[in-house]
């Protein structure tokens, strides 16, 4: 076998590996898209419940105003949550959410002091939930950052 034949064989082997890698990437992308769509469908159901409550005023006047703006395409839930919407109702909603988080932390601290064992379980569950939310957020950012390939 000549040097040229060996080189051609190596190139063919590399091309085969590259095709295999590409197939894996395509498969993983399809799986990620399917998983993301499944997640979005559950989130959409929950968000529609929130939106109905907001429209009716059940969540308060700030959420009612924000939902009107969401429905008109003037803002989004993401913009509200991430502070991109700097309207007074959005700031009020974020402030209330922060106060609620502080209150939950305060109650946890009290619970930790009064019932050490069950409070520790609560803390572990809460910490795990926070970590899960961070991971989901990171995954959503990764998915959003990737261009969607053509899936034929």
Image: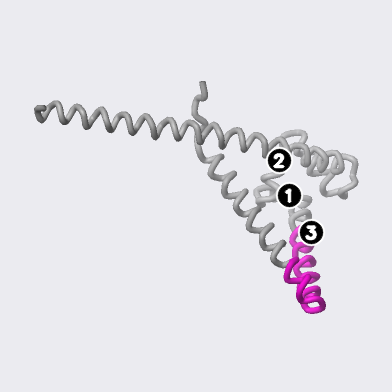
How far apart are the alpha carbons under marks 3 and 2? 19 Å
- Residue range of the region highlighted in magenta in the rendering: 96-122
The residue labelled by disc 3 is: 96
- What secondary structure characterizes most of the magenta part? helix
Please say if 5 is above or below 99: above
> Circle 2 is placed at which residue position?
75
Residue at 39%, 34% (x, y): give it. 21
At 85% across and 43% down in the image, what residue appears?
54
Name the residue: 32% across, 29% down: 16
Could you say whether the residue bearing mark 3 is in a helix, strand or loop? helix
Label 1 belongs to which residue?
87
Q: Dot 3, how many residues are within 10 Å of its Cα: few (below 14), some (14-19), or many (20+)?
A: few
The nearer-to-camera label among 1 and 3 is 3
Q: Which residue reaches farthest front?
A: 1
Query: Foreground residue, 27 or 95?
Result: 27
Where is residue 84 shown, x and y percent of the image? 65, 48
How far apart are the two marked residues, 1 and 3, measured between alpha carbons?
Answer: 14 Å
Mark 2, secondary structure of its residue: loop
The residue under the point 83% across, 40% down is 49
On whether residue 138 falls in the magenta region, the answer is: no
- Comes first in the chain, label 3 or label 2: 2
Q: Is 108 drawn above or below residue 134 in the view shown?
A: below
């Amino acid at each position: 076998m000549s040097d040229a034949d060996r080189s051609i064989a190596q190139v063919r082997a590399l091309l085969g590996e590259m095709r295999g890698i590409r197939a894996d990437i395509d498969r993983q992308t399809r799986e990620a898209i399917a998983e993301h769509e499944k997640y979005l469908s559950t989130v959409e159901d929950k968000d529609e419940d929130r939106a109905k409550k907001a429209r009716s005023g059940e969540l308060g006047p700030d959420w009612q105003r924000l939902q009107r703006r969401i429905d008109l395409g003037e803002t989004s839930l993401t913009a509200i949550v991430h502070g991109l919407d700097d309207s007074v109702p959005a700031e009020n909603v974020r402030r209330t959410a922060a106060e609620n988080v502080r209150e939950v932390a305060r109650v946890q601290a009290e619970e930790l002091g009064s019932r050490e064992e069950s409070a520790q379980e609560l803390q572990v569950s809460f910490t795990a939930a926070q970590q899960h939310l961070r991971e989901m957020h990171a995954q959503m950012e990764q998915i959003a950052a990737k261009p969607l390939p053509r899936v034929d």
